[in-house]
Image (cartoon, rainbow, N blue to C red):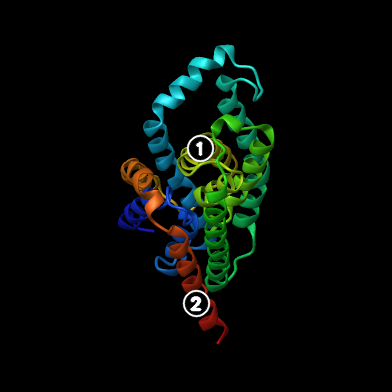
């Protein structure tokens, strides 16, 4: 991988992380299909780039984060009190995300090499599934009126388990968590903000855990630094823009189309 490729991937990550189209899935397709990167290096570099969008989320939601830290002195686990509800939700969902997501990631990067066409096709299937879920959730959400005051332990468990699945390339973290929040009855804006807030502890835990237990062979420090910097810079702008336009765009259609296109190389490989 070259430095210019790292910059390009960082820019793409900065934009796609906040869209329900699977930044990891699309990055993996680009790295394998265009930049001829191996599956394991593509999986590791896509995780590394999340450090940049993590920093962007921390900066963007700094007021909410500061408020959470201020409340920690009086915090008591539970969902009865409004001041404890969000932090309890984040703790439960993050723990379950790690329990589900970490073994899946280790399996992905440790599997025997498979043809890139097959791996990309599997990503395509995951993208189509994510897109159809988004469409279904969007239709169902019209019938619900819940808000963040209804947050409970059950929702925390469901969202934690669901977010853990997003480590699979092609399953959009923001897409799948937002979809399930909509299905659970949360409003559109609340679903987006809560999904983005969930990404902060989950991605932080993933970066620390994965960096400490896996090798980043094949990725130079310069490439990682450039990719992370540009994913942060672009991500900071993209998250603001997306929160403003999300309700006006049907991203599920884009996800399904990309997923279908991703399956074409498998057909050529089979023939």
Q: Regarding mark 2 in the picture, which secondary structure is present there? A: helix
User: Toward the viewer: 10 or 255?
Assistant: 255
**In the rendered structure, which disc, 1 or 2, sits on the residue that comes first in sequence?**
1
Task: Say which of marks 1 and 2 sits in front.
Answer: 1
Quarter holding the N terminus is bottom left
The image quadrant that residue 90 belongs to is top right
- Kindly identify which numbered label has been placed on residue 194: 1
User: Whole-percent x and y of residue 153?
Assistant: 68, 33
User: Toward the viewer: 268 or 226?
Assistant: 268
The image quadrant that residue 146 belongs to is top right
User: Toward the viewer: 31 or 236?
Assistant: 236
- Kindly identify which numbered label has been placed on residue 265: 2
Q: Residue at coordinates 45% horizontally, 25% vertically from top-left?
A: 65
Quarter holding the C terminus is bottom right
**Mark 1 burial class by Cα count in 10 Å: few <14, some 14-19, many 20+:** many
Q: Residue at coordinates 64% horizontally, 17% vertically from top-left?
A: 76
Q: Please, is residue 38 above or below residue 179 in the view?
A: below
Q: Regarding mark 1 in the picture, which secondary structure is present there? A: helix
User: Whole-percent x and y of residue 115?
Assistant: 56, 72
User: Whole-percent x and y of residue 162?
Assistant: 63, 47
User: Whole-percent x and y of residue 151?
Assistant: 61, 33
Q: Residue at coordinates 40% horizontally, 68% vertically from top-left?
A: 34
User: Toward the viewer: 229 or 145?
Assistant: 145
Distance in Å between CA atoms under marks 1 and 2? 36 Å
Q: Please, is residue 136 above or below residue 79 in the view?
A: below
Q: Residue at coordinates 67% horizontally, 48% vertically from top-left?
A: 103
């Amino acid at each position: 991988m070259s430095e210019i490729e790292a910059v390009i991937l960082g820019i793409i990550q900065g934009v796609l992380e906040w869209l329900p189209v699977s930044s990891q899935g699309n990055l993996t397709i680009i790295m394998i299909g265009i930049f001829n990167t191996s599956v394991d290096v593509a999986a590791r570099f896509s995780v590394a780039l999340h450090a940049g969008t993590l920093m962007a989320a921390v900066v963007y939601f700094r007021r909410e984060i500061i408020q959470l830290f201020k409340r920690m002195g009086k915090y008591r686990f539970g969902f009865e009190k409004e001041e404890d509800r969000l932090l309890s939700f984040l703790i439960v969902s993050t723990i379950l995300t790690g329990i589900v997501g970490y073994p899946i990631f280790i399996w992905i990067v440790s599997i025997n090499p498979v043809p890139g066409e097959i791996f990309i096709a599997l990503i395509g299937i995951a993208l189509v599934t994510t897109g159809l879920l988004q469409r279904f959730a969007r239709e169902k959400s019209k019938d619900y009126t819940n808000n963040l005051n209804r947050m409970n332990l059950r929702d925390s468990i469901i969202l934690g388990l669901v977010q853990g699945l997003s480590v699979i390339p092609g399953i959009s973290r923001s897409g799948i968590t937002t979809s399930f929040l909509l299905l659970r009855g949360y409003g559109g804006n609340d679903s987006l903000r809560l999904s983005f807030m969930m990404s902060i502890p989950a991605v932080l835990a993933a970066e620390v855990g994965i960096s400490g237990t896996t090798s980043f062979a094949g990725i130079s420090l310069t490439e990682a630094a450039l990719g992370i910097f540009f994913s942060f810079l672009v991500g900071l702008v993209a998250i603001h823009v997306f929160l403003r336009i999300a309700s006006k765009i049907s991203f599920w259609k884009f996800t399904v189309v990309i997923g279908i296109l991703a399956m074409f190389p498998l057909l050529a490989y089979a023939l």
